[in-house]
Image (spheres, rainbow, N blue to C red):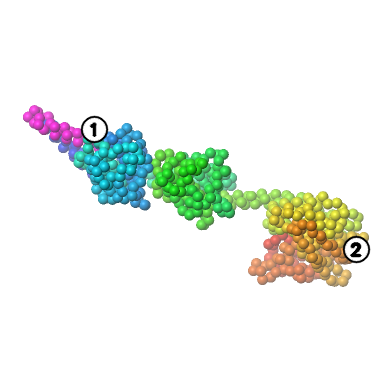
Amino acid sequence: MPCVPEKRESAKKLEAFFGFCRFEKRQSLTLGPIHASLGASMVKVDSEARKYRSLLSTSTILNANLDLYQLLPLIMLYSKDLLEAEASSLFLLEEKDGFLYCEVALGEKGEIIQKYARLEPGQGIAGWVAKEKKPILLEDAYTDARFNPSLDQKTGFRTRSLACVPLFVQDQVIGTLEILNKSGNRSFDNSDIEVLASLSEIAAIAIKNAKTHESLKKRILELSLLYEFEKLTVAEKSIQELGNWLIDKVLEFLEAKAGTIYLADPTLEVLRILAARGIPDDAIHSIQVPYGEGVSGWVAKEKQSLLIQNLDEDPRYDKNAKYKFEASSLISAPLLYRGELLGVISVNNKYSGYAFTHADLEMLGAIANRLSVTIQNANLFHKVVDNERELKRAREVMAKILPSALPYVPGLEFGVQHIPFDNVGGDFYNVIKLDEHRTAVLIADVSGHGLSASVVAAVIHTVMETFEEETLSSPSKFFTALNHALYNKLAGNFLTSFYAVAHTGTNTLVYSNAGHNPPILYRKEEGTSLPLETKGKLVGVIPDLFFEEFVTSFKPMDRLVLYTDGITEHSNEDRSRRYSEDLLTLAIRSLSQNSAGDTAPGLIKECRTYCRRSDFEDDVTLLVVDRV
């Protein structure tokens, strides 16, 4: 490392000095009382020698300690004890923003007399020393304009004399080391400055080594954590379990006690807690943070990372919040995926008690980037799983609604094709044998797809089962009663439907239409096609509607084709070829020799062939009723 030569050079200087001191001491003892007048000066030299011997042992101890959070208090303790000071402080330079910060200042008994403090370049004694790169010695601090008494006022400590030196690594200032109030009401002198400067050289190199070690250690931990993320199988955990696992891993990595992962609700523009440590469990689900409010809200709104080294001095920190952080420092980062806000992660309360740094924030940013991908993947996975579950439930619902087999009815034959979009749709049909001669046929289309549409279909089916035969025998009464029962109960959905009653005894068809596509009545004997067009309203939208019914002949060799709009709105990929009612009518005519059972799939095939596309973009249902 580049700092090793500096360490050896300092050691050489110290050893040379110690050799000189030993030689001088032997000389004085050999000469005896003749040179007694030199005694006082030699006592002083001996005292200096002891100081430099202490420096040598201090150098060994400090450079052996690669834990920055243990090293900084050690440096202050050694400087205080070595130079017989009442207190000491050590400021480090924040390279990114250029300010000085002091994690703690130690008093006479090693107690903490000042927690996190921040100085701008040139501010106060430490700021001046760092900016000018010069040591300073003051017999009375209060007589110097550079001294800032506000720290004394804040801590209750009274500064008299002080000595402060810059910390250098290869001519670069990395901080300052300061001692306050020499014991016995004495003042510091130039010899103290010299010793403090020597100690600062040792301290600076030790700090640099510790920072390098910490950086490498953090990088290894970061790679290890990211590797764990890569191994993580989101299928194994629910979103809640995943959140708890993630926050525990992040806090372990950043050596912090408390933290929160929020998920964003873009509709309401609030953050909700996914997982937290340091907040009571019973409060987690009740906390919502609006965008722009508080620390996390600011991060969400601005989509920027945030480092706060002193929460009490930051206006974004709500000091009156019900659940406050038990710490003075915090880092927070947005969880972004392709620019979209997924949430926010905040970490506070380091185990060391020290403030977070820009290095911590950068690491949290790297973690946040990977967290975003992990959460997005988990969201997509669980959305698919939820959709699958929803589709499964919807299929189960529709299986109970759709007839498993069409009834045998003398004089009638049936053919059906039901192709739901995405496996489950809102189309349904039914054939109800009322008596020996009367049979009702129904086709319906509920808006939407999936579980919501299937639930509405289930509601309609349940309502229909309550109808008496009198209601089922009359299309007008049927739709009037259905509309009354469903009004304001479809949760934003609506229903179109066609209902008819075929009478094989009278060869008639009584029908009513509720906003549905007009079925096509093909009369094979005449070779004509007739769309059963009527004016009808949607079911469940307007209260107290009356639905008109109509009658037409339905004699042997006639064919009735009921369908939903999924077939007549089918098209090719570029929309240049679209199926229509006219094309469906032609297909019905061309398949008139086929049975009802063969005609239904034949019509589907004709539609797909014309559009040159097999997959439909909507539910498709065909019900073919032949009068035989």
* The one of 524 and 503 positioned closer to us in this rendering: 503
In the image, which disc is placed on residue 507?
A: 2
The residue under the point 55% across, 39% down is 281
**Residue 570 appears at what percent x and percent y?**
70, 65
| Crowd around label 1: few <14 · some 14–19 · many ≥20 (10 Å) | few
Residue that appears at 17% across and 35% down: 45
Q: Does 42 appear in magenta?
A: yes
Q: CA distance from mark 1 to mark 2?
A: 123 Å
Amino acid type at circle 2 is Asn
First-in-chain label (1 vs 2): 1
Secondary structure predominantly adopted by residues drawn in magenta = helix
Q: Is residue 454 found inside the magenta-colored segment of the image?
A: no
Q: Is residue 525 in view from this perspective? A: yes
Q: Is residue 337 left or right of residue 573?
A: left
Q: Nearer the viewer, residue 170 or 185?
A: 185
Looking at the image, which residue is at 41% across and 39% down?
Answer: 353
Residue 612 locus on image (x, y percent):
69, 67
Q: Residues within 10 Å of mark 2 (few under 14, many from 20)?
A: some
Which residue range is magenta in the image? 29-55
Q: Dot 2 lies on which element?
A: loop
Task: Looking at this view, name the residue that lies furthest to the left.
Answer: 34
User: Is residue 523 placed above or below 320 in the rendered structure?
Assistant: below
Going by the image, does 312 lie left or right of 75? right
Quadrant of the image occupied by residue 355: top left
The residue that mark 1 highlights is: 184
